[in-house]
Image (cartoon, rainbow, N blue to C red):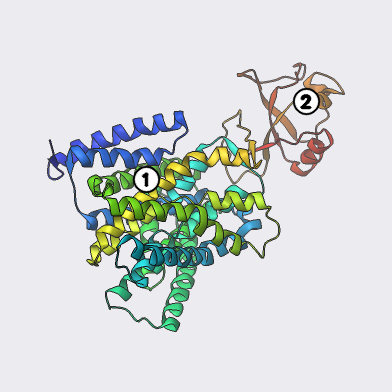
Amino acid sequence: MIIDLSGEHIILVGALLLFVAVMAGKVAYKFGAPALLLFLGVGMLFGWNFISFNSPQLTQFVGMVALCIILFSGGMDTKFQEIRPIIAPGVVLATVGVLLTAFILSFFVWLVAPWLGFTLGFPAALLLAATMSSTDSASVFSILRSKKQGLQECLRPMLELESGSNDPMAYMLTLLMIAVLSNTGNVGIATNILYLVVQLVVGALMGYLIGRAAVWSINHINIDNTSLYSVLLLAFIFFSFAFTDLLHGNGYLAVYISGLVVGNNPLTHKRTLTVFFDGFTWLMQIVMFLMLGLLVNTRDLFQPEVLILGGLVGFFMIVAARPISVFLCLLPFRNFSTKARLYISWVGLRGAVPILFATYPLVAGLPNADLLFNIVFLSTILSLLIQGTTVSSMANTLGLAYEEREASFQVNMSEEMRSALTEVEVNPQLLASGATLKEISLPEHTLVMMICREGNYFVPQGNTALQVGDKLLVISDRSEELETLYHQLGISEITKHH
């Protein structure tokens, strides 16, 4: 039975889809598969047998809204002190890397297509490659942050910075090639380069200014209902995208930078805002992947031309286009090992964004737009299946992974407090001067607030006997002295609470 997705059916079907998607995400987490891949699969399954949905325009609009939320939330969760050491290589990968990937892949498609019986000019091949040229922020954020695994050489902030900031370049290149193929754009090289530069500069500038305006407004507007701060911030997100676009800047870049600014400045009710956007971002990811899964005609994916060309494009992207562009972009940066470069090449995940960008040729009514969409869709599935399921195992294989320490205490401090709150594990050196709390030498104005022992929590007193392996929650006004003491005692694993 095929249900027409309209009218009263929308709410019922939407609720059912969300429920099935959440259950699929739980299964995915258990077996180590990307949850977003299963969200996509749920949409494909329902679109194949139960739901009739064919609206690229609506999918594109929902995807645009979802991507704004995802990019803003990703920027908000990114700590500037973490990305500071890798800003230069991250920006190069997000700009030059996207262009290199697009051109390398387009030459491959242009050369291979005639052998498979396709008539595909170089501009059309470049359009196909442009839609796939950026890594997917939703996939990278969700997979890296769901794994209880640390990465050496600042690889996690590097990959998150790249995936969060490289969509604008792919978006602009996609729109540019659509304009060229539809004969509605200026094809002069100098004009196009100027267009790209203006988009990036205006997008970055407006993102920073609107982010600062959002911080000021939230900190100075007194709203009795704290839930409305989330609504206010949502308004700033959509304003950042739309107003920047009116000024001929890149709205996606503006949204991401606004998120960076908001997330790295003191903010009233920051904990409330963070919790809200965590849940809302997951909702947007699920909705976007479900709609993209519903949009595709699953039967078309099994057409020989789609299977062959889509498989070749996906495989070439993984083993050649992405690694070549990464190694070329990172040539000036000597602080990355060969293993790190290989890992960055491998975590070039494709996801919802390439599929979303592939709807633009459909809406524009370009020739072979259906074929392009199906090829991008199949290549994305291959990327999620091959790369998405091996993010952790590849890091272990290359020796770049370490076990990430989980906090034993869930504490949120006001940003107005100047005291440092840290969590450490008791080692034998700490007990060298005595086993009780009062015998431990701590700096002045330092207090052990709580102890966690084998999962049990209690407030200590001076005569409390400590044991090796106890977790201590320590607050101090002398953070520098405390860090020096930790170093002297050989305590290297320190969890800082903010």
**Residue at mark 1:** 285
* Residue 487 image position (x, y, % from top left): 81, 38
Instruction: Examine the rendering and report whether any part of residue 260 can be seen.
Output: no
Instruction: Examine the rendering and report whether any part of residue 190 can be seen.
Output: yes
* Quadrant hosting residue 83: bottom right
Q: Secondary structure at mark 2?
A: loop
**Residue at mark 2:** 427
* Residue 186 image position (x, y, % from top left): 34, 81
Judge the density around disc 2: few (<14), some (14-19), many (≥20) Cα neighbours within 10 Å.
some
The answer to whether 481 appears left or right of 306 in the picture is right
* Residue 80 image position (x, y, % from top left): 60, 54
* Residue 223 image position (x, y, % from top left): 40, 48
Instruction: Say whether disc 1 or disc 2 marks the residue closer to the N-terminus.
Output: 1
- Inter-mark Cα distance, 1 to 2: 43 Å
Residue in view at x 38 percent, y 41 percent? 37
Tell me the tag on residue 172.
Answer: none
Residue in view at x 56 percent, y 31 percent? 410
Amino acid type, residue under disc 1 in the picture: Gln
Amino acid type, residue under disc 2 in the picture: Asn
The answer to whether 157 appears left or right of 29 in the picture is right
Observer-nearest of 379 and 401: 379
Are discs 1 and 2 less than 8 Å apart at CB?
A: no
